[in-house]
Amino acid sequence: QVQLLESGGDSVQAGGSLRLSCVASGYTYSSSNCMAWFRQAPGKEREWVAILYTGGGSKVYTDSVKGRFTIAQDNAANSLTLQMNNLKPEDTAKYYCVAEALGSCRNAVSYTYWGQGTQVTVSS
Protein backbone atom coordinates (compact mmCIF):
# COMPACT_ATOMS: atom_id res chain seq x y z
CA GLN A 1 0.00 0.00 0.00
CA VAL A 2 1.40 3.35 -1.04
CA GLN A 3 1.36 6.16 1.47
CA LEU A 4 2.67 9.68 1.15
CA LEU A 5 2.96 11.50 4.45
CA GLU A 6 3.51 15.25 4.46
CA SER A 7 4.69 17.32 7.37
CA GLY A 8 6.00 20.79 8.07
CA GLY A 9 2.94 22.92 7.51
CA ASP A 10 2.36 25.72 10.00
CA SER A 11 1.14 29.26 10.49
CA VAL A 12 3.80 31.90 9.88
CA GLN A 13 4.02 35.60 9.23
CA ALA A 14 4.79 37.01 5.83
CA GLY A 15 8.48 36.82 5.09
CA GLY A 16 8.92 33.65 7.09
CA SER A 17 10.10 30.24 5.95
CA LEU A 18 8.83 26.69 6.14
CA ARG A 19 10.18 23.36 4.97
CA LEU A 20 7.67 20.75 3.89
CA SER A 21 8.63 17.11 3.80
CA CYS A 22 6.93 14.12 2.23
CA VAL A 23 7.99 10.58 3.05
CA ALA A 24 6.84 7.79 0.78
CA SER A 25 6.19 4.26 1.89
CA GLY A 26 5.35 1.39 -0.41
CA TYR A 27 6.67 3.46 -3.29
CA THR A 28 10.07 4.49 -4.57
CA TYR A 29 10.11 8.09 -5.64
CA SER A 30 12.96 7.64 -8.08
CA SER A 31 10.88 5.17 -10.09
CA SER A 32 8.61 7.96 -11.31
CA ASN A 33 9.41 10.32 -14.19
CA CYS A 34 8.55 13.29 -12.00
CA MET A 35 7.75 14.28 -8.45
CA ALA A 36 5.79 17.34 -7.48
CA TRP A 37 4.10 19.53 -4.95
CA PHE A 38 0.62 20.89 -5.55
CA ARG A 39 -1.41 23.27 -3.46
CA GLN A 40 -5.04 24.22 -3.11
CA ALA A 41 -6.34 27.40 -1.59
CA PRO A 42 -9.96 27.74 -0.43
CA GLY A 43 -12.26 28.24 -3.38
CA LYS A 44 -9.52 27.62 -5.92
CA GLU A 45 -8.43 24.68 -8.03
CA ARG A 46 -5.39 22.65 -7.21
CA GLU A 47 -2.30 24.03 -8.88
CA TRP A 48 1.16 22.65 -9.35
CA VAL A 49 3.81 24.49 -7.39
CA ALA A 50 7.08 22.71 -8.12
CA ILE A 51 8.11 19.71 -10.19
CA LEU A 52 11.31 17.70 -10.18
CA TYR A 53 11.98 15.59 -13.26
CA THR A 54 13.93 12.52 -12.24
CA GLY A 55 15.38 11.85 -15.68
CA GLY A 56 17.58 14.89 -15.87
CA GLY A 57 17.06 16.37 -12.46
CA SER A 58 15.52 19.55 -13.83
CA LYS A 59 13.18 21.54 -11.63
CA VAL A 60 10.39 23.87 -12.62
CA TYR A 61 8.35 26.24 -10.52
CA THR A 62 5.12 28.06 -11.04
CA ASP A 63 5.80 31.74 -11.67
CA SER A 64 4.48 32.96 -8.33
CA VAL A 65 7.03 30.96 -6.31
CA LYS A 66 10.13 31.25 -8.50
CA GLY A 67 13.14 32.36 -6.52
CA ARG A 68 11.41 31.61 -3.22
CA PHE A 69 10.66 27.86 -3.23
CA THR A 70 13.04 24.95 -3.79
CA ILE A 71 12.05 21.35 -4.44
CA ALA A 72 14.49 18.60 -3.60
CA GLN A 73 14.65 14.84 -3.38
CA ASP A 74 16.31 12.77 -0.69
CA ASN A 75 16.86 9.33 -2.18
CA ALA A 76 18.17 7.85 1.05
CA ALA A 77 15.06 8.89 2.93
CA ASN A 78 12.76 8.28 -0.06
CA SER A 79 11.35 11.72 0.53
CA LEU A 80 10.55 14.93 -1.25
CA THR A 81 10.97 18.35 0.30
CA LEU A 82 9.84 21.87 -0.46
CA GLN A 83 11.79 24.71 1.08
CA MET A 84 9.64 27.83 1.12
CA ASN A 85 11.24 31.19 1.84
CA ASN A 86 9.87 34.72 1.92
CA LEU A 87 6.35 33.39 2.28
CA LYS A 88 3.48 35.61 1.24
CA PRO A 89 -0.19 35.59 2.29
CA GLU A 90 -1.09 34.33 -1.19
CA ASP A 91 0.92 31.17 -0.47
CA THR A 92 -1.73 30.17 2.06
CA ALA A 93 -3.06 26.78 0.97
CA LYS A 94 -3.04 23.11 1.67
CA TYR A 95 0.06 21.58 0.13
CA TYR A 96 0.14 18.08 -1.29
CA CYS A 97 2.95 15.84 -2.44
CA VAL A 98 2.14 13.58 -5.34
CA ALA A 99 3.63 10.61 -7.10
CA GLU A 100 3.29 8.39 -10.15
CA ALA A 101 2.32 10.69 -13.00
CA LEU A 102 0.70 8.82 -15.88
CA GLY A 103 0.39 11.93 -18.02
CA SER A 104 1.55 15.52 -17.88
CA CYS A 105 3.49 16.25 -14.72
CA ARG A 106 1.77 19.64 -14.51
CA ASN A 107 -1.71 18.16 -14.47
CA ALA A 108 -3.19 17.13 -11.14
CA VAL A 109 -5.31 14.40 -12.71
CA SER A 110 -2.15 12.67 -13.96
CA TYR A 111 -1.07 11.59 -10.50
CA THR A 112 -2.04 8.29 -8.96
CA TYR A 113 -0.91 8.93 -5.40
CA TRP A 114 -1.60 11.93 -3.17
CA GLY A 115 -0.66 12.69 0.39
CA GLN A 116 -3.26 13.91 2.85
CA GLY A 117 -1.95 17.47 2.65
CA THR A 118 -0.35 19.85 5.10
CA GLN A 119 -1.74 23.32 5.80
CA VAL A 120 0.36 26.41 5.30
CA THR A 121 -1.08 29.70 6.54
CA VAL A 122 0.75 32.97 6.00
CA SER A 123 -0.47 36.09 7.77
CA SER A 124 0.36 39.63 6.77
Image (tube, grey):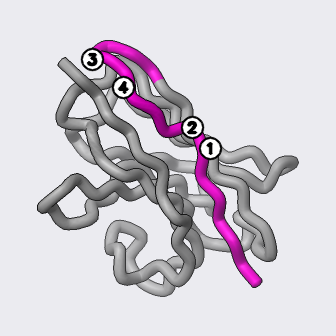
* Disc 4 versus disc 2: nearer the observer: 2
Secondary structure type for disc 4? loop
Identify the residue position indicated by label 1 in the image.
21
Residue 14 x/y as whole percent: 27, 17
Q: Amino acid at mark 4?
A: Arg
* Disc 2 versus disc 1: nearer the observer: 2
User: In the image, is residue 19 above or below residue 79?
Assistant: above
Span colored in magenta? 1-17
Q: Amino acid at mark 2?
A: Gly
Q: Amino acid at mark 1?
A: Ser
Q: CA distance from mark 3 to mark 4?
A: 12 Å
Whether 2 is among the magenta residues is yes
Identify the residue position indicated by label 4 in the image.
68
Whether 29 is among the magenta residues is no
Pointer 3 or 2: first along the chain: 2
Identify the residue position indicated by label 3 in the image.
14
